[in-house]
Amino acid sequence: MGGNNGEAYMIRVLIATAGAVAIASLAAEATVQNPLLAPWTGPYGGVPPFDKVKVEHFQPALAAAMAEQLAEVDKIANDPAPPTFENTLAALERSGRTLDRVGTIFGVYSGTMSTPDFQKVEEEMAPKLAAFSDQITQNEKLFARIAAVYGARDAAKLTSEQKRLAWLDYTNFVRAGARLDPAAKKRLSEINQRLAALYTRFSQNLLADEADYVLFLDQESDLAGLPDSLRSAAAAAAEQRGQKRKWAVLNTRSSMEPFLTYSDRRDLREKVWRTFYSRGDHGDAHDNNAIITEILKLRAERAKLLGYRTHAHWRLENTMAGTPERALELMEAVWKPAVARVREEVADMQAVADKEGAKIKIEPWDYRYYAEKVRKAKYDLDQNEVKPYLQLEKLREGMFWVAGQLFGFTFTPVDGIPVYNPDMRVFKVTDPSGTLVGLWYFDPYARTGKNSGAWMNAYRNQESFERPITTIVSNNTNFVKGPPGEPILISWDDAIALFHEFGHALHGLNSKVRYPSLSGTSVARDYVEFPSQLLEHWLSTPEVLNRFALHYQTGQPIPPALVDKIEKASTFNQGFATVEYLASALVDMKLHLAGEQTIDPDAFERDTLKALGMPSEIVMRHRTPQFGHVFSGDGYSAGYYSYLWSDTLSADAWEAFTEAGGPYDKAVAKRLHDNVFSAGNTVDPAEAYRAFRGRDPGIAALMRKRGFPVPAESKRGK
């Protein structure tokens, strides 16, 4: 998952209040001993006090931090001096520092340590926390001052970055309902509080289904086809769950996908597939369908209140796409060639199954399994042959090396930094002069209470507003931890995901802006995935593979012949990958273009996919009842298309390197740093991309990357 804006997202979703009286009563419980309320201390500009935090600290800390920020905002709003950038927008940048810190750690617990006692706090505070945001954006005196500064931005001779912040603050307040009448504001706040509660329930339901539906295998015959690395990891996962001498297939993507790829047991493949893709859709206490129906209704009502046709139109207003129609245009341009490629892929797989005498029709639980057989037949490439060279720790070293080549960063492990799990590690990041850039935390393994998938968080944003403040970022993945002392071997797809999330981290680490609201990954949703998707390309470069794709037993680098096979097979199975993703993106967009009608999620999903001509052999990457990107918060709602939009940029940007001196061309890397990775949200993303590339992107590079026919009008790059 892009996940990138973890801190900002959690604060947006989780900031609210039950009113001044409730805040005051809760704040009274806060004490000076609460570690969440104290400024972060220790080396590197201070670090999160994970070693001191307990669940019971959150409720009083959130209450006290909200009360503090309300007092700060009230002082700004009632300042008798005429509004200026300094006494209004800069003052807002100074406010809420305590809540930033508390909200960050609250978000970390929500994503990685969601224990039953924490979930109770989350359920209680989420709706309280959502009105707080409304209380600020609906403050009429404050908005009047923001509007005055925005209106005078040219006359006041603000810097370009100050103008960008003025635009951002003014726009965000307007989009959050600052200009509504009192009755509409009241209803808007009710909607936001209810949505916060629903998002929390959705996420907790999904987490419960991932934890509760573990498949334990009892006998050796159940493991037919699985490579030794998977067997070992499954045995370790079972033992961790008290089932010694058994094997566990977890209900997470990182466990499901390799099982479906290698298991010879078609009956078990179907069982694992059905369990994974029915998360949130069991008709039980953790079913998400009714929650989704209500979320969609409330989002549609909110959009109308704010003056937009649909939730999709509201969400896309300040993105690169600008309108749902433009996003749909891109998706539909790629959908048809992708479906055509799926037909070819299925025919190839069916031929293999027929030749083996399987007497089956390819079903969704067969796709990955037979795709591997076709890959081997067509390219003589067996992923089991590649996997021994893909050690998690060596690939981490490879990512660091790439960051050094492109941006001059050095990563050094540091001890004595508090972490929330003993498997977590911390590295300091320095530039070529030895100056501290920030800290990078790595949380690699799956465990109970941790969301599945992979993401990046910013624990602290870079800024140079009143003094230089370095960033703290984290990458979080869900690899299955093997036996002690054994290297973790991962798939090629997982290696790409590792580089992807590290791209988000580098976006945060490279940030060089003045104001924290414009820092790092705080950019438009359909632009934020661009740096991360671009970084994926460096995994397959010979420089990385020769140095870091080392056999876990012999230490020998991956053979050139195998690298050549990987390169030749780079567009293999792109029909599946593209259709699986695009189906989710299209359903997401169409759900949010449906307006105020009552939606039955399962029926809408089924009917929409049928109308699109969805191949029966594939299911959406994220089925609606488990679509956390879209229903655990507003983050990617009507915005899952962003990955395709951003990949249009990343494919085109990669060709900037290949057209020049290659992947490590210093001049292109400097342009990338100066205009993209370091700029945050200080400039419009379309302008930033043009400054890097010299022109707008087009679809041609994306189609070439995926091995699809390039439309005639796109053949010249744009």
Image: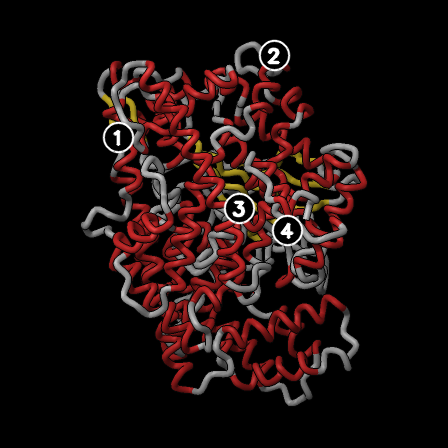
Residue in the image at 30% along x and 68% along y: 597
Mark 1–mark 4 Cα distance, whole angstroms, equals: 45 Å
First in residue order: circle 1 vs circle 2:
1
Is disc 1 in contact with disc 4, using a CB cutoff of under 8 Å?
A: no
What colour scheme governs how the chains and residues are painted in the rendered image of this protein?
Answer: secondary structure
The residue that mark 4 highlights is 471
Mark 4–mark 2 Cα distance, whole angstroms, equals: 37 Å
Residue type, mark 1 in image: Glu
Q: Please provide percent x and percent y for residue 388.
A: 50, 17
Instruction: Work out whether 26 lies above or below 699.
Output: below
Crowding near pointer 4: few (<14 within 10 Å), some, many (20+)?
many
Q: Nearer the viewer, residue 343 or 38?
A: 343
First in residue order: circle 3 vs circle 2:
3
Residue in the image at 33% along x and 14% along y: 355
Relative side of 129 to 268, left or right: right
Residue in the image at 26% along x and 30% along y: 270
Instruction: Work out whether 699 lies above or below 56.
Output: above
Q: Secondary structure beneath disc 3?
A: strand
First in residue order: circle 4 vs circle 3:
3
Residue type, mark 2 in image: Gln
Instruction: Work out whether 366 lies above or below 298.
Output: above
Crowding near pointer 3: few (<14 within 10 Å), some, many (20+)?
many
Residue type, mark 4 in image: Thr
Q: Which mark is residue 270?
A: 1
